Amino acid sequence: MMRLPLFEFRAPRTLDEAARILDGERASALPLAGGTDLLPNMKRRQQVPRTLMSLRHIEELHHARLENSGARIGACLTLTDIAEDSRFRNGLTGLAQAASVVATPQIRNMATLGGNLCLDTRCNYYDQNYEWRKAIGFCLKKDGTTCWVAPGSRKCVAVSSTDTAPALISLGARVRLVSRSGEREVLLADLYNNDGIHYIKRRPDEILSEILLDSLHGWKSTYWKLRRRGSFDFPVLSVAAAVHLSPAGVVQDARMVIGSAACRPLVAAEAGKALIGRSLNQETIVEAATIAARIAKPLDNTDFDMTWRKRVTAEFVTYALRELRGVDVRAEREALTRHPAI
Amino acid sequence: MLTGQDLPIQYGILPVSQDEQALCLDHVRHVGDPVAAVIAREELTAFEAMDLIDVDYEILTTISDPEEALATPEPRIHDYGEEGNIHKRVALEFGNVEQGFVEADEIFEDTFFYQGNTHLPIEQHAAVAIKDPDGKLTIWSSTQTPHYLHRALAKVLEMPAAHIRVIATPNGGGFGGKSDPFNHEIVVAKAALLLDRPVKICLTREEVFYCHRGRHPILMKFKTGVKKDGTITGMHLQTLIDGGAYGSYGVASTFYAGALQTTTYHVPRYKYEGCRTFTNKPPCGPKRGHGTVQPRFGQEVQLDKIAEKLSIDPADLRLRIAESSNSITANFFRLGTVNLTECIRRVVKSSGWKEKFRKLPEGQGVGLACSAYLTGAGLPIYWNKMPHSGVQLKFDRSGGVSIFCGATEIGQGSDDVLAGIVAEVLGIDPFDIRLFTGDTDLGPVDLGSYSSRVTLMAGNAALQAAERGKALIAEGVAEKLEVPKDRLRFAEKRVFDSIAPEKGVTFQEAVCLAEARFGTIGTVGSYTPPKSPALYKGGGVGPSPTYSYTAAVVEVVVNPVTGWITVPKIWIAHDIGRALNPPLVRGQVEGSVYMGLGEALMEEQEFRRLPKKLSHALVHKFPSMLEYKSPTSLDMPEVFTELVEEPDPRGPFGAKEVGQGPLLPIMPAVANAVYDAVGVRIDEVPITPEKIMKALAEKKAGREPRYGPKHFPHVNWPEALRVPPPWEGGDGNAVNEAPRRAKPKTEKERVLTP
């Protein structure tokens, strides 16, 4: 059975109206952005909301203001909008790269930035048909009590699989969350929990409306993604890196984020610190990569062998840092991506 | 709701493996084996009802792979077969293979593993059945074999076959996965008869993975003796085959796995031992290249190792030992035209092989491999002496021609081939032809779209029917024009005097003249393959009217740190005989390359075992199109296709097969290219970055730079049937078996030529 369950559909035109709907419905309603993840999940009965509330007709969610002093990006910009808009370059290159490697062109045309940030965590035992999950016994994340990945675990270990979150975290992004009772700004790095079920701190009555960035003057960023196919696939490891370099090439600040290696994107703070005050060279890059890779502890719940994913993490960090250093790594990128690279 | 008791009669594609039930009765053999069917007015209702069914299972010991099956004779998954959980054992020896090893300068022993994978057609299986007003049954189904489905329905429903009509619908991909009669087809037929209303089912993608019938996982051991110049002196192949929970085509697959080693290179002495076991997983069956793909991988990789050891270029080695046209192999397969050496020369030239092999920088490499494949199975699935394909033509006063044939269009272009052949003979436009195919009521039997048989067999039947129609029309026209009929030509929608071309009539007028003379004009044609000289028991699997040949060069780039592998370019040359429709032929070659690359690099039918305290059942790891990894169009490399055309008189206008053969060299060529790139052997498919990295670690540690199976388990092989090869005076019979059939009269092979 792979049909959508029945649901009510709401399509508010303003953020206020949307906030009122969510306030009234509470957890029984889900906001619908591109729907590219939510609707297949509903077919598999991973989510069965009584009401779907479309965000598409809310004008202000589709705006992007990019200025030297900073950026405000509406949550409903599609990933294609971001990948193809040349304003998302320089400091924002990492974000554009991340958006450009999400799924397929068709999905990127529908999928939104906000939706990708809120993407449900994934697991080989969870992203299955209702019948499959029922047949082996429902898992901890949905309807069950056992974690099939780590049967001793009391915590769900489903994997954060968003591409854009690591990129935006490396850029120091904040997000605006709007509800009927008001609004708040949260540092994106703090939006996520290391818990496969309660992976996001967005309350059910809140709408993630905007992504906010400070000035990225002097910053360079990049995003590297490991997946089986260079055409499309969820990430099974990703590295987002951003550095602020002095004119002499000394690292003023550096942020590295490892994606898809836990229930949340992991900030490699120690690795970033290790680079500050030094220039990017073979030695510092390898040192930082080694430190960064330590925090990745992949489990056996995605594609590829987990040991191999762990072992190639440092190599992926070096790709990112070498690229930021100015080394030509196009061949490495082309080997991983089957569409034109940004 | 229906359960097993409503459909108790067993069926199965092969007469020797009638081991399936539409719905399980007493015994569930794999996760995905259907136990009940719910019919409702709409899907959501059926879904809710299905969720309310509780099944109490008594847990039996499960078997995950052939080694476990050998070690676990009880409980038996089926109560038939050789013994325990062994479904089929085969042992054949053509000449004294030990003597071959005595004469060898070098002996190579290698073990390979080929993982199972599935067809992954974009369209899931679907079927609709209705009870006709007069009580007959009509079923539309996405099937490759309407005739075999017809037979299975008649058996299980206990209805006269004459009251059942099977219509094969236009089909969104088959690749062998829609060649068995399936549970869901029988269930909707039964439900339609009971309810007297149309009943439809569309399988979910998950259910398609459970229908499976895909590539058998096979463990193989090759022992090959060679002279210093590369000449093969003897080969001994053993296979251990994971059949899954049912027979399906498995007995044929077991023979196929040992059949075609001799058809590419000259093997003077050959021994084959094969063993298929049952396991508690979805049944394996025929996937593109049926049974021959796995040992082809082993053979071609081993040849690469042989060439390396003997310091011979692998292309040159193959040129030396390639089989030649019109030979009879050690196992008594009669070859047609063989243009393997030309295929090799073409890809060597186009790929720049001589400048690349062992000369590219570290991390880049090229690999070469070849293959052969049958152009249609020489025998039908069930024993009978009737033609394998029949065609009826109806000539209309309008000048249009209708073709009626059971052949099944599954996207490969078989309709186009039939229209093209008839149009060519009659000198008319294919657009003036209407086709009625894949319908058991409308057309004469064609056995189905499998074994690369349709172009040659249905094509030859169409050719015969068209020639017969042409003869009738020529008589009518000859009388009118007062020209001898053998001077008439059929071209450009006209029938005219070849000496005075202006003297003629339109094709429409010609048909009218013939109809006036003879009455309604209709002709038939049929095709039966030539008798095979392989008379020994088991010799029925592998013979074909003729074989196609392919050579491919694959270029890879391998990251020496991560093992990441990409394939930028592939050069492939295919011996097609003659391309009746070159774009379709190229489409099949490129489609084969695509599918082969998926098998080479990522596709796996993987299972997880549930904990023992639950059920210990084998559960498909991820039955979804997203997580069963298969390349997409964007992942395709550049493919350079060349067609080698030397018409084979056995095929219509000289055509041979193309649907399957070009898949076979891709996987071994990738493995050989990986060795050229980074110096490690991956003796296993798929060839993943993890495996390459492990082999690289072995190399770094100074151990054998290889990833692959380490042993071949003990199997109690039966005494081999000993068949002396032709060059030892053999007559095609085994010397240690009572002759089964009289040797066929040495009649000249009857060849239809245009």
Image (tube, coloured by chain):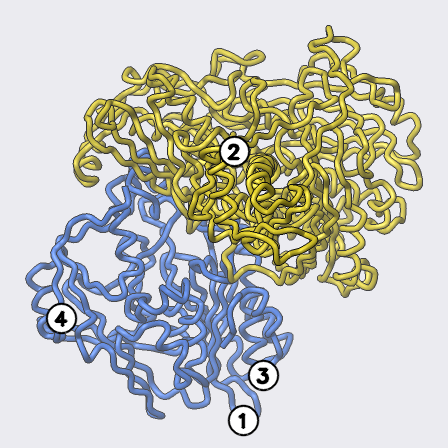
Note whether residue B336 is visible.
yes
Q: Earlier in the sequence, mark 3 or mark 1?
A: 1
Residue drawn where x is 43% and y is 22% of the image: B151
Q: Are marks 2 and 1 on the same chain?
A: no
The image quadrant of residue B330 is top right
In three-dimensional space, the C-alpha distance between marks 3 and 2, rounded to whole angstroms, equals 85 Å
Q: Are marks 4 and 2 on the same chain?
A: no
Q: Are marks 4 and 2 in contact (CB under 8 Å)?
A: no
Q: Earlier in the sequence, mark 3 or mark 4?
A: 4
Residue A81, position as x, y percentages in the image: 35, 77
Q: Are marks 3 and 1 on the same chain?
A: yes
Nearer the camera: disc 3 or disc 2:
2
Q: Is residue B392 above or below residue B250?
A: below
Q: In the rendered structure, which amino acid carries the disc numbered 4? A: Ser
Q: Which chain is mark 2 on?
A: B
Tag 4 residue: A179
Chain drawn blue in the picture: A
Chain B pictured colour: yellow
Q: Secondary structure at mark 3?
A: loop
- On residue A279, which mark appears? 3
Q: Secondary structure at mark 1?
A: loop
B699 vs B96, nearest the viewer: B96
